[in-house]
């Protein structure tokens, strides 16, 4: 283990709300070894921003890491040229031009269909009834898994997210994760011959056209489903909750003083849907007097970085007037989220403006007190709402 100071956490409390413990670490032990997680945590924004780029020391190549073992070696678990080669291969499916010219209209049509079913009901859980199907419909077209039902996309995404953050080693969580990856493989099997005969801009198809191996293609599709369903789902529902819980901030958007993109970006800073990224120490190094040895595990805590008091004034507040430029909700350096453009477009150009336009007088259900959970990945489990019919 590193020579970092040892800090213990209560895993249950940390999952419920990691921010008090992270705040204490930032103030007292900004680099700390946490035995309950078996990793050294980096909690300060500027340190993470700098060190994440030093791939020769903090490598994404983690042969024994949970993501690699459970989902396959995707591009996010590679560095340097291998990472860039696969990133280049998938780019045609997620480029800003592809999102603008092809996917955006399909996002809008799918979101309208979801709202058509929901609008007349007058109430619902906007995690399961809105954010989940909207995110899943977007993933169906981007990945090319048109044969996969929305509920199965959501189930497999959550199962993989649970699996790759299973640092306490729960056997049931691992078994469920493997069941989820097997389901994705079966759905890919059915689509491969279709795209061999008729290529399109989907993630499956462009990787095949680029000559990536079958294993590479499958691992990257699983990566897209794990993050591409979980993060937009949690960000859509979470931003709705944040705006409804902060009516003065919602008024800023509705009055045109701020926009939906700012509402989303500030939510992603305030309650980072992706709160952590793991790394493996590739060679010995010393940082701020702390020594690291080869093959140690490090967690870059994005959720902590985005509430760093030295970077953001009043960081625990949801405030649309702040500068979110320093936020690293999508990561930094060579592993900046490849799907960031698609996510931003789906959330800020489609999901948020449509849900507030279509569901009149949208409000939290009486007595509802939604609360995000999680630390590696954080989001609402339910968002009971009501609206006028």
Image (tube, rainbow, N blue to C red):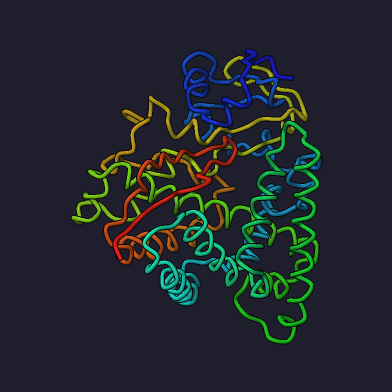
Q: Position of residue 275 (x, y in %)?
A: 54, 38
Instruction: Classify 352 as above or below 59.
Output: below
Q: Is residue 325 visible?
A: yes
Q: Residue at x 65, y 39 (%)?
A: 55
Image quarter hosting the C terminus: bottom left
Viewer-closest of 197 and 22: 22
Residue 51 located left or right of residue 124: right
Residue at the bottom extreme, as displayed: 197
Residue 381 located left or right of residue 252: right
Viewer-closest of 159 and 307: 159
Residue 343 located left or right of residue 256: right
**Which of the 4 quarters of the picture holds residue 339?**
bottom right
Q: Residue at x 73, y 46 (%)?
A: 67
Q: Residue at x 74, y 56 (%)?
A: 180
Image quarter hosting the N terminus: top right
Viewer-closest of 172 and 187: 172
Q: How many marks?
A: 0
Viewer-closest of 49 and 194: 194
Q: Position of residue 282 (x, y in %)?
A: 74, 33
Q: Position of residue 306 (x, y in %)?
A: 44, 35
Q: Is residue 100 visible?
A: no
Q: Position of residue 93 (x, y in %)?
A: 58, 69
Q: Residue at x 58, y 31 (%)?
A: 15
């Amino acid at each position: 283990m590193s020579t970092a100071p040892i800090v213990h956490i209560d895993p249950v409390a940390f999952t419920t709300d990691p921010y008090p413990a992270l705040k204490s670490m930032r103030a007292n032990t900004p680099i700390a070894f946490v035995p309950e997680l078996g990793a050294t945590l980096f909690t300060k924004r500027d340190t993470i921003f700098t060190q994440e780029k030093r791939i020769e020391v903090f490598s994404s190549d983690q042969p024994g890491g949970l993501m690699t073992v459970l989902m396959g070696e995707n591009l996010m678990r590679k560095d340097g040229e291998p990472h860039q080669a696969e990133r280049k291969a998938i780019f045609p499916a997620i480029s800003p031009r592809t999102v603008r010219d092809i996917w955006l209209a399909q996002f809008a049509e799918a979101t309208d269909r979801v709202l058509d079913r929901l609008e007349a009901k007058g109430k619902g859980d906007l995690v399961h009834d809105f954010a989940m199907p909207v995110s899943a419909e977007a993933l169906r077209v981007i990945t090319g898994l048109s044969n996969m039902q929305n509920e199965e996309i959501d189930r497999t995404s959550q199962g993989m997210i649970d699996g790759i953050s299973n640092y306490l080693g729960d056997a049931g969580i691992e078994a469920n994760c493997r069941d989820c990856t097997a389901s994705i493989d079966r759905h890919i099997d059915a689509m491969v011959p279709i795209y061999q005969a008729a290529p399109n801009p989907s993630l499956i198809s462009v990787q095949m056209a680029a000559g990536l191996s079958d294993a590479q293609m499958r691992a990257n599709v699983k990566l897209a489903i794990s993050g591409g369903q979980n993060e937009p789902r949690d960000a859509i529902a979470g931003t709705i909750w944040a705006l409804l819980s902060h009516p003065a901030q919602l008024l800023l958007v509705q009055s045109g003083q701020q926009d939906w993109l700012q509402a989303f970006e500030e939510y992603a800073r305030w309650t980072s849907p992706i709160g952590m990224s793991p790394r493996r120490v590739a060679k010995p190094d010393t940082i701020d007097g702390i020594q690291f040895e080869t093959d140690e595990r490090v967690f870059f805590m994005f959720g902590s970085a985005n509430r760093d008091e030295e970077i953001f004034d009043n960081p625990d507040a949801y405030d649309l007037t702040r500068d979110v430029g320093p936020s690293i909700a999508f990561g930094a350096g060579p592993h900046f989220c490849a799907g960031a453009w698609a996510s931003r477009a789906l959330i800020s150009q489609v999901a948020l403006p449509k849900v507030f336009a279509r569901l009149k007088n949208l409000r939290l259900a009486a007595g509802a007190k939604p609360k995000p959970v999680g630390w590696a990945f954080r989001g609402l489990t339910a968002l009971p709402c009501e609206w006028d019919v």
